[in-house]
Image (tube, rainbow, N blue to C red):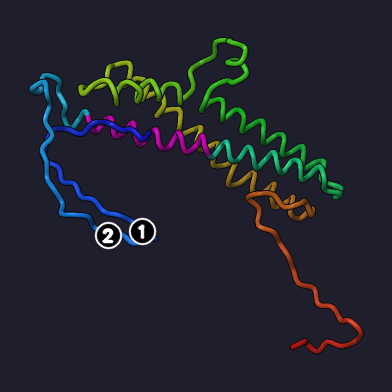
Amino acid sequence: EPAGPYVIPGSYRVSMAKRVDGAVTPIGEPRTFEVYQLDADATPRTPAVLAFQQQTATLARAVLGANALATETMNRLNLLEQALQATPAADAARLAADARTLESRLRDIQTSLTGDRTAARRSESSPPSLLDRLNDVTGGLWSSTLGDATTTQKRQYEIVGSEFGGVLGQLRTLVTVDIKRLEDSAEAAGAPWTSGRFPTWEAIGADVGGNDTPRR
């Protein structure tokens, strides 16, 4: 289920509505309510604490999105390689080799994001991935405490924040530049259509039986 950090004590306002066939209709009147801590503020819940947790939520959204994009892109590359194997053009073999090279680069990106799956299957130790570090922060910070993050959690956040930018840049270049170039080359070579590519077609006029009068 979706989860997030707890709010800070204060006054809040809630409303309800129903949506049927795209039409949103309010239900009842908005209500206000108070949020307070049952331990009489023994555990500090300050705007600064919430702000840090919201920062982790923003980072988690980006890392999880990058991981999902990497998975989708790997599927695109696998399908493209299969299509190139069925392409009779002379340069299809070279393009297939290019696809395998991009797969290797993408696999390295996935390892940075989610860890070394080969080592995990063999029960071998491997460095923590960005998602491993991020889960260490969100897993405990959002569900088990109302107070400030620990020094270790803050350090984990700093590591993910400092490394993720480079990984995201590599993924962006691979998806928007390198794979786009490969897909354009595959389209020019006449490869069967694969997901992510926009097919090209140019109408060629034909004179059948010497009659070019359009039919009605």
Which one is nearer the viewer's eye here, 204 or 195?
A: 195
- Range of residues picked out in magenta: 50-68
Quadrant of the drawing holding the N terminus: top left
Magenta stretch contains residue 88: no
**Position of residue 114 measured from the top left corner of the image (x, y, whole percent):** 52, 25
Q: Residue at x 72, y 34 (%)?
A: 100
Q: Residue at x 58, y 40 (%)?
A: 72
Q: Earlier in the sequence, mark 2 or mark 1?
A: 1
Left or right: residue 61 compared with residue 91: left
Q: Is residue 181 above or below residue 78?
A: below
Left or right: residue 24 compared with residue 216: left
Q: Which residue is mark 1?
A: 20
Q: Which mark is residue 37?
A: none
**Position of residue 174 measured from the top left corner of the image (x, y, whole percent):** 60, 40
Q: Which residue is mark 2?
A: 25
Outermost residue toward the right? 209
Secondary structure beneath dot 1 equals strand
Q: Residue at x 33, y 31 (%)?
A: 56
Of the residues shown, which amino acid type is indicated by label 2? Thr
User: For the image shown, how many numbered marks are present on the structure?
Assistant: 2
Of the residues shown, which amino acid type is indicated by label 1? Val
Dominant secondary-structure state across the stretch colored magenta? helix
Q: Is residue 209 above or below residue 172?
A: below
Q: Is residue 117 above or below residue 125?
A: below
**Position of residue 157 measured from the top left corner of the image (x, y, whole percent):** 36, 25
Residue contact at pointers 2 and 1, CB within 8 angstroms: yes
Q: Is residue 34 above or below residue 207?
A: above
Secondary structure beneath dot 2 equals strand
The image quarter containing residue 6 is top left
Crowd band around label 1 with a 10 angstrom C-alpha radius: few (<14), some (14–19), many (20+)? few
